[in-house]
Amino acid sequence: MANNTPSASVQLLEKLSRAFGVSGFEDDVRDVIAQFVKPLVDEMRVDPLGNLIVTRKGKSDFTLMLDAHMDEVGLMISYIEEKGFLRFATLGGWDVRILPAQVVKIRTRQGKLITGVIGSVPPHVLKPEDREKPFKLEDLFIDVGASSADEVQKMGIRLGDPAVPYYPFEQLSENLLGGKAFDDRAGCAVAIRALQELQRENLDLTLVCNFAIGEETGLRGARAAAYSINPNVALALEGTIGADVPGVAPARQPTALGKGPAITIADNSLVVSRRVVEALEKIAEKLKISYQYKLPIYGGTDAGAIHTTRGGIMAGVLSVPCRYIHSQFSLLRLDDFESTVKLAVGFVRECRELLS
Ligand SMILES: [Zn+2]
């Protein structure tokens, strides 16, 4: 089947990575995802918050919710200077030290993407004692080449417009992909690939995929979607912290690239039900998929919001390890991605029997 080939996964990840989708402004990425999933599902709807919720009906009402968030960490124009420079706030968790000198795209209300660069005081002009210090957010501004606030307005840029550092997707080698927003377009791609794999199968449960808004700003979309979907079990699909890099001791590396999908036991937002962890382990072992545990207790995911919705929902997390998430350009290995798809598909097939 053509869509099983690695290159189909690469194309999918490229389209998702390139799409604009700063938290609260997920329209573009939602359109891209909707195009992929429409032929694969029985129902498709967008809820009032902007979550894209799609359903594959099966032989029973036992409902599995797969959740992947569409949004990416980004910026928001917070003030327009008289001379045409733009001040900005951050949306989601940024390390401000990595923002200076980055090329950004600002999305206007008309949907146009305008290029700018994050400027700061040049090193030549900085006082010697300040050269050692990292820039703070208030030292930074976006330069779009306008010379007045008027000119900024003529370009279509308004207060509150979202922006994001932008680097084009690239396949660095056969097994290594680089691009922005793998957190969580990797998870979105896992959900889409799982729907493709299961397209011709008569499922024994009802599968609902939620492509969520606003995870990076507080797990906002998943909480509301979990309430309306009311699943028996939920699995959040993530692109998570791969920290197998110099300067990080193994005991502090939440996940490493090349070790397969990461099963979460506990993070800052939940302690995963032992039954869900054991179901994932059992399925991985049966399918001979090598996996790793995400070291406790780094990060938080939509599963944190989902498991405390309504009277409580059994939830777990399965992740593709990605280096440099919450930065301009992250890296993931295609073999990790494909194994995560396999394990997610296995979970759809077996979770009703293991967890009902
Ligand atoms: Zn994420």
Image: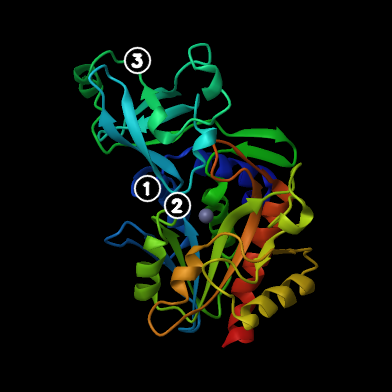
Q: Nearer the viewer, mark 1 or mark 3?
A: 3
- Give the numbered dot on residue 26: 1
- Give the numbered dot on residue 70: 2
Across and down, in percent, residue 2 comes to: 64, 49
The residue pinned by badge 3 equals 145
Bin the neighbour count of mark 1 within 10 Å (Cα to Cα): few under 14, some 14-19, many 20 and up.
many
Residue at 59%, 75% in the rendered image:
272
Asked whether 155 or 19 is in front, the reply is 155
Q: Amino acid at mark 3?
A: Gly
Asked whether 36 or 335 is in front, the reply is 335
Across and down, in percent, residue 139 comes to: 41, 28
Circle 2/circle 3 CB separation < 8 Å? no
Q: Amino acid at mark 1?
A: Glu
* Dot 1 beta carbon under 8 Å from ligand 1: no
Q: CA distance from mark 1 to mark 3?
A: 26 Å
Q: Is residue 203 above or below residue 183?
A: below
